[in-house]
Image (cartoon, rainbow, N blue to C red):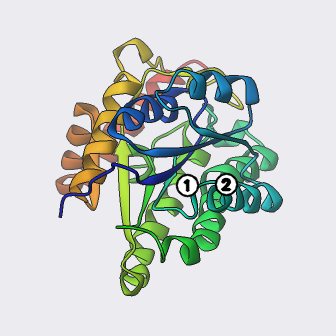
Amino acid sequence: MTRNLQDRRILITGASSGIGKAMAHQLAPLGAKLVLAARSEDKLRAVANALPGGALVVVADITRESDRQNVLGRAVEHFGGLDVLINNAGIASWDHFANSTEEILRQIMEVNFFAPAELIRKAIPILTNGVEPAIVNVASMCGRRAMPAWSEYSASKYALCGLTEALRGELARFDIDILLMVPGLTTSEFSQHFLRSEGKAKIEYDKGMPPEAVAARIIRSLQQNKTESWIGSDTNWMLRVNRWFPRLVDWLIARRVRKLYEGA
């Protein structure tokens, strides 16, 4: 199938910056009716004001049940329903697990897994009445191959990937498509909001993908109804090698970590 996004009612979480903001800028010219959700009202309104036709802005902390209900309720009130839910909001921590805390683990799981899971649960009855309804879960390469110093983040994205696969079968009876996006390193404001940023390895963010490129791929996958999309050369290389040589990847990663901690 080819999904036409003209007049489609689309909710994007984490829409105030990065990939979410880029998706809004690319979906609006296609004629989509957008609901933009994030915690920062000023940033959200700046995004909406720059869009042709504007967008519905809903300030929300999606880890709160009342905010999730409000986002969906506002979408129904304003547009009469919802056709696409894009779970894009996320947070991370860049440090080794032994140095981290239970609070950080729980916070990451709340934002990256429990919040989108519960948003999906509440959205199902609304999407059932939508036009070519779909759920798009933006995961990460770390959700298919966990990485050191990204332990909590990897766990949360693995959980999101697992939920996506399970729901694909469950939601088929409602004719709701559920799509998984697996991007690699992206150049955005994401790294500026890490809960911890003390990992020893050097991350070359300047070599990451522009959020606009990631957004374009996500939108194309939504139009083409592609079940799972690996986005970026780093993602494709890592996941293909890991598929056939997982023990080699384990060995190479462990060797690198040992070198980082030599003399520590």
User: Which residue is rendered at x = 48% and y = 51% of the image?
Assistant: 10
* Residue on which disc 2 sits: 109
Along the viewing direction, whichever of 29 and 25 lies nearer the viewer: 29
Q: Whole-percent x and y of residue 174?
A: 42, 83
Q: Which of the 4 image quarters holds residue 31?
A: top left
Do the CB atoms of the residues marked 1 and 2 lie less than 8 Å apart? Answer: yes
Q: Quadrant of residue 226?
A: bottom left
Tell me the quarter of the image containing the N terminus.
bottom left
Q: Quadrant of the C terminus?
A: top right
Q: Secondary structure at mark 1?
A: helix
User: Which residue does the image show at 59% across and 23% down from the upper left?
Assistant: 49
Q: Residue furthest top?
A: 206
Count all numbered tags in the image, as a single digit: 2
Residue type indicated by callout 1: Ala
**Lower position in the chain sequence, tag 1 or tag 2:** 2
Look at label 2 and name its amino acid.
Met
Residue 53 to residue 61: above or below: above
Residue 179 position (above or below residue 18): below
Task: Tell me residue 157's x, y (percent).
Answer: 51, 53
Which circle marks residue 229 in the picture? none
Q: CA distance from mark 1 to mark 2?
A: 8 Å
Q: Observer-nearest residue: 100 or 192?
A: 192
The residue wearing badge 1 is 155
- Expressed as whole percent of the image width and height from the top left, the position of residue 5 reads 33, 50
